Amino acid sequence: MNDSTKLVPLRRKGTRHRPGTHPVPVTRRAFIETYGCQMNIGDSELMAGVLARRGYVTVNDPANADVIVINTCAIREHAETRVRGRIGQLQVHRRNRPDLVVAVTGCMAQRLGESVLETTAGVDLVAGPDSYRTLGDAVEEMRFGGTPRGQLLLALDEAEDYEGVEAVRREGVTAWVTVQRGCDHRCTFCIVPYVRGGEKNREPGAILAEVRQAVDDGYTEVSLLGQTVNSYRSGDWDFARLLEAVARTGGVRRVRFTSPHPNDVTDDLIRVMAEEPAVCPQLHLPLQSGSDRVLRRMLRRYTVEDFLDTVERVRSGVPGIALSTDIIVGFPGETEDDFEATLEVLRHVRFDDAFLYRYSPRDGTPATRLPPGDFVDDEISGRWLQEAISLHREIQRQINESEVGTVREVLVERRARSEGDMLGRTANGKVAVFGGPESWRNTYRDVRLTSTSGPTFRAEVQP
Ligand code: SF4
C-alpha cells in the first residue's frame, strides 16, 4: 500500500475543462487526499474530473478548500484508523469555512456506510466507489441547495464504469488508466469484492482514446489499473492484446500494469512483455503464502507449484525482469511450518520487492468466520512479520548490490527529499536518486547506479 497522496492543481491540455474554457466559473476548490492502492489514485483523479464539471479545481492545501475528499482504503484496520485521525485533524478548517463539505469516499466508506457518520464526527458525505459520478451534484446540493449534511451514496452499480468522465490527473509523470473495476475472485481475507463489486471491464476503444489523450497531455508513461488487471476481457480483446495496443500507441514510451493475478499470466502476455519495447520489465505477482494449505484456505486458486511455474515462464520469457509480491503472515490456521514454507519461497524466488503484511481481519470476509482457535497470536504473527521482512531486505540488498555500476535509463519523477536531488525510476521499477534540477522532471536520463541503501539507489547522471 502506498502512503497518502495529495492531489495538486490539474495539468492538462486539449480537454473540455482546460483553464479558460471551463463550463462553470472557477471559484470552487477541492482538496483530495488519497489512501491505499493505485486504484484509489485513479479514482481520485476521476473524482477530480467529476468535481471539475461543477467548477471545482483541485488544490493542495485543505485550508483553501470548499470540499475535502478523503479517499479511503479498507484493506487493513490500520488504514481505517489513520483515516479517522486525519478527519479529526481536518475539522480545524471549518472555523473559517462553515460551509466546508467533508466527504469520505472509497472502500472504507463502502464497507462502513452509515456507521462512518455515527462513529466519526465531522463527516458530511459518505460515497462508495460506484457513486462518484454524482459526487459533484451532491456536494453542490449540500452547499447551496439546502440538502442536509450526512448524505450516503453507497449503491453498488454493476454497470458503472465511469465511461465519459474525464479524469483530472495529478501532477505526476504517470498517467493512471483504469481498465477494470471490481473483482470476481473471493479470496477469503479480502474485502475488495464486497466494497467494489464484481469485475467490470472498459471498452478497449475508450481505454485507447484515454491513453492517446494522456500522451497529448504530455505523459509518456502509462500504468494500466485493475484489481486483477490481466483477467481483462472485452469482446475478443484480452489483456495481452490490450497491453500490446497501448504499448504501440504513438508517444507511449513506458507501460506498466497493476495488479495482476498469478493465474492469468498467459504465454501471450509474456510474449507481449518480451516483444514490446515500451512494456516495462517488471511484474507484480502476489503470492500471499508459500504454503498450499494456507493458499487453499485463502481461496487463492493456485498452488505453490503453479506459482513457481509462472515465475519460471516469466523469467525465461523476459530475462532480467524484476518481480515483486505481496505476502500475508498470520492467516488463521497458519503454523510455523506454513510460515517456514513462505520463507522458503522467498529464498527460492528472490523477489526484487515484497510488500509484507500481518493478517488483518475484515468484518464480512469469509476468513473472519474461521474457528476462533485458528487465529494466530499477535506476538507470533509479529515475530513472523519481522523475520520475513529481514529475509526480504537481505535478498533485496543482494540483488540491488549486483546492479550497482550499471547504467540505466530513468524517468525523472520529482524532487527527492535530499537537497538538490531528483528522484527517478528505472524501467524495471527501481528508484534512483541523483543530483539535478527540477526542470528535469518528466524527462528521461541515463544514470549510473553508484550505491544502494537496500531498497533504493544513489546514482550519477551520465554526460
Ligand atoms: S484477487 Fe483476491 S486479493 Fe485480489 S482483489 Fe480479488 S479478492 Fe481481493
Image (cartoon, rainbow, N blue to C red):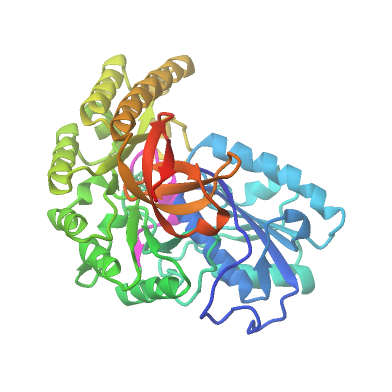
Q: Nearer the viewer, residue 135 or 463?
A: 463
Percent from the top left, x then y, of residue 65? 74, 61
Q: Is residue 17 above or below residue 126?
A: below
Residue at (23, 27) in percent of width and height: 345
Residue 146 counted in the magenta span: no
Say which quarter of the image contains residue 171.
bottom right
Question: Is there any visible trace of residue 146 in the rendered image?
Answer: no
Percent from the top left, x then y, of residue 298? 31, 35
Residue 191 counted in the magenta span: yes
Say which quarter of the image contains residue 48.
bottom right
Q: Is residue 54 above or below residue 240?
A: below
Residue at (66, 41) in percent of width and height: 84
Q: Nearer the viewer, residue 99 or 389?
A: 389
Percent from the top left, x then y, of residue 321? 24, 44
Q: Is residue 198 above or below residue 434?
A: below
Residue at (20, 39) in percent of width and height: 302
Q: Nearer the viewer, residue 459 or 212?
A: 459
Q: In the drawing, does residue 299 fall left or right of residue 135?
A: left
How many marks on residues? 0
Say which quarter of the image contains residue 337.
top left
Find the residue positioned furthest to the front. 463
Q: Is residue 227 above or below residue 143?
A: above
Question: Is there any visible trace of residue 154 in the rendered image?
Answer: yes
Q: In the drawing, does residue 203 fall left or right of residue 86?
A: left
- The stretch in magenta equals 187-201
Percent from the top left, x then y, of residue 463? 39, 51
Find the residue positioned furthest to the right. 96
Residue at (21, 61) in percent of width and height: 276
